[in-house]
Image (cartoon, helix red, strand yellow):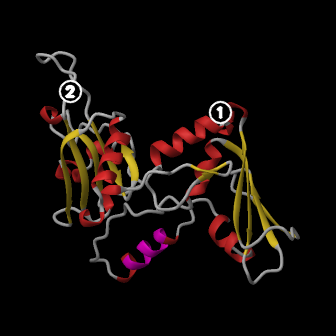
Amino acid sequence: MNKNDLVDNLGTIASSGSKKFLEQVQKESSNVNISDKIIGQFGVGFYSSFIVGDTVQVISKTNQDSHAYLWVSDGSGKFEISSIGDPGFQRGTKIVIHLKPESLIFSKFDEVKKIIQKYSNFINFPIHLNGEKMNLVGALWSREKKEITADEYKQFWEYISNSQLPYKYKLHYSTDAPLSIKALLYIPTTHSEKYGLHAEENEVSLYSKKVLIKAKCKEIIPNWLRFLKGVVDCEDIPLNISRENYQDSALVAKLR
């Protein structure tokens, strides 16, 4: 980003291109009915960094500029922009978060690794932590069945089940109507329940666009199918849905 981009995109908390787009469409036609649950309605996502940081720095440089720009804010609504002549900084953007004392746990390698692998393990973009790639497992459910080998199905099963025991059956399912759904579900060869005791916990996770919405999502699978393990990805569920209140969504009821 250049200086003007930093002002336009980061200068106002909750500034949002998609929000402006929605307002413009509604202004042009009052009859247009568009869901307000679009990605970006709460502004640039990195503002959530002020939950754990007291100061955030953004360093950005375009190919057209000979130097980079430094944007600094404490989240109060004020910011400063200055040019920096760092010859080693190439085109791109770098974000530095100065953590609050009570949030220092997020500076620990193991904690950040756990968060990445829980919520962002399957996204397409590589995520590196201290030079090590974190998201190593591919989103097998999003690929065409004819492109996937038996060994890949086996490896994915072992990853989600944390077991070396073979699975009995699998269902690789995809549909675009009435919802956009891609799912990969496995039936194990055995389970740990005995005569209805020690009921197993549902291990089917709900994703939207390869981003985890909820692990062990009991709201989309009947209890009598609690032995299933796998993934259900529904692109119709908005990414900005509240993780606590998603079960109130009519979409989730329809998905069930």
Separation of residues labelled 1 and 2 (CA atoms): 37 Å
Kindly identify which numbered label has been placed on residue 153: none
Kindly identify which numbered label has been placed on residue 105: 1
How many numbered badges does the structure rendering display? Answer: 2
- Say left or right for 140 vs 93: left
Q: Is residue 136 above or below residue 175?
A: above
- Going from N to C along the chain, the mark reached first, 1 or 2, is 1
Examine the image and state in which quarter residue 243 appears. Answer: top left
- Say left or right for 204 vs 195: right
Marks 1 and 2: which is nearer the front?
Answer: 2
Residue shown at 57% from the left, 55% from the top: 127
Query: Which residues are the magenta region?
Result: 18-25
Taking the image as drawn, is residue 210 in sight? yes
Query: Could you say where residue 136 lies in the image, as x and y percent from the top left?
Result: 49, 51
Residue shown at 15% from the left, 17% from the top: 194
Q: Is 117 in front, or is 19?
A: 117
What amino acid is found at the position of numbered circle 2 in the picture? His
